[in-house]
Amino acid sequence: MKRKIGLIGVPQDLGASRRGVDMGPSAIRIAGIEKHLRKLGYDVLDFGNIHCHDIDEHTENYTMDPRLRFLPYIADTAKHLKQIVETAIEMGLFPIIIGGDHSITIGTMAGMKKLHGGKTGIIWVDAHGDFNTPETTPSGNIHGMPFAVVCGYGDPSLTEIGPSPSVSLENTVLFGARDLDKGEIDNLKKVGVKVITMSDIDRNGILNSSLEAISHATKNVDYLHVSFDIDVVDPYEAPGTGTPVKGGLTYREAHLFLEMIADTNKLASFEMVEVNPVLDTRNKTATLAVGLILSAMGKKII
């Protein structure tokens, strides 16, 4: 019997400060995500792109909270995504969500509660922490807050969607970080998130660091979510992203990590976010994103 995937595009860019990430789902589709998943042995139901609000439609009569830019529209998209993910779960599909900026995870994990009730581990694979709150944010960009939200911290308009926490706090990992704000460092420590930085990976190697992350995220739970921000990969390999930071994972380090994720047999949902074709070169970053998704879904060299 073939395994079945529900592919969900979320072309949202309101959570970020640079435009273009709303075209990420299309770029990933152009790079052949559905075709390659089918070649790997999956049936794929593509839900298409869900409706997301456009910045140009909402600025005229909207007074923006500088700490929570475009909050009502981001919350609305999260609620819509929650419903689509729940539908995929009811249909027995494995959800793969392609973004879009990282704020979409709020809706993803709200929807995944239908499967696991929040009793799931999460590995947040990202150059950044995304653990700011309205009190600590330096920018007001909500794509810098979703990890905190799924852990139960943030504005009630967002935490109530799940409701949060929509993950097991004892099984939270930030992997590949190298650019953290002071406020979110304090927040991460307060919650007890296991943080594995690029310095840790440099010192201990990708194999041991991956084992450490996976062990922490999967201990005493049956489900795992991986939220993969493409900016965790070094900009040399992934130029098409809005907040690049030098010194990231290499091509093979990223693939090995996700191959090891696939080996756990606990992966219940997967996200690929922050691919920005406007900043890319010949769709290089979207093509990389497709390859990484395939590794998470079980593709091997042999």
Image: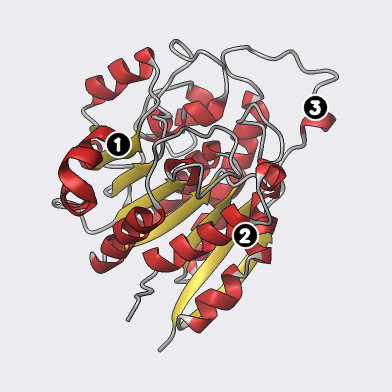
257 up-or-down from 171: above or below: below
Q: From this viewpoint, which residue is outermost toward the bottom? A: 1
**Which mark lies nearer to you, 2 or 1?**
1
Q: Is residue 145 left or right of residue 252?
A: right
Is residue 217 in sight in this rendering? Answer: no
Percent position of residue 125, x then y:
37, 43
Numbered-mark total: 3
Q: Which mark is residue 58?
A: 3
Please tell me how crowded label 1 is: few (under 14), some (14-19), or many (20+) other residues with Cα within 10 Å.
many
Q: Closer to the camera: disc 2 or disc 3?
A: 2
The residue type indicated by label 1 comes to Met
In the image, what residue type sits under mark 3? His
Which amino acid, mark 2?
A: Ile
Please tell me which of labels 1 and 3 falls first in the chain: 3
The image quadrant that residue 197 belongs to is top left
Residue neighbourhood size for the residue with mark 2, other residues' Cα within 10 Å, grouped as few (<14), some (14–19), many (≥20): many
Return the residue at label 2.
28
Which type of secondary structure does the marked residue at label 1 adopt?
helix
Q: Which mark is residue 198?
A: 1
- Tell me, yes or no, whether the two marked residues, 2 and 1, touch with CB atoms within 8 Å: no
Q: Rate crowding at label 3 as few (under 14), some (14 to 19) or many (20 or more) other CA atoms within 10 Å.
A: few
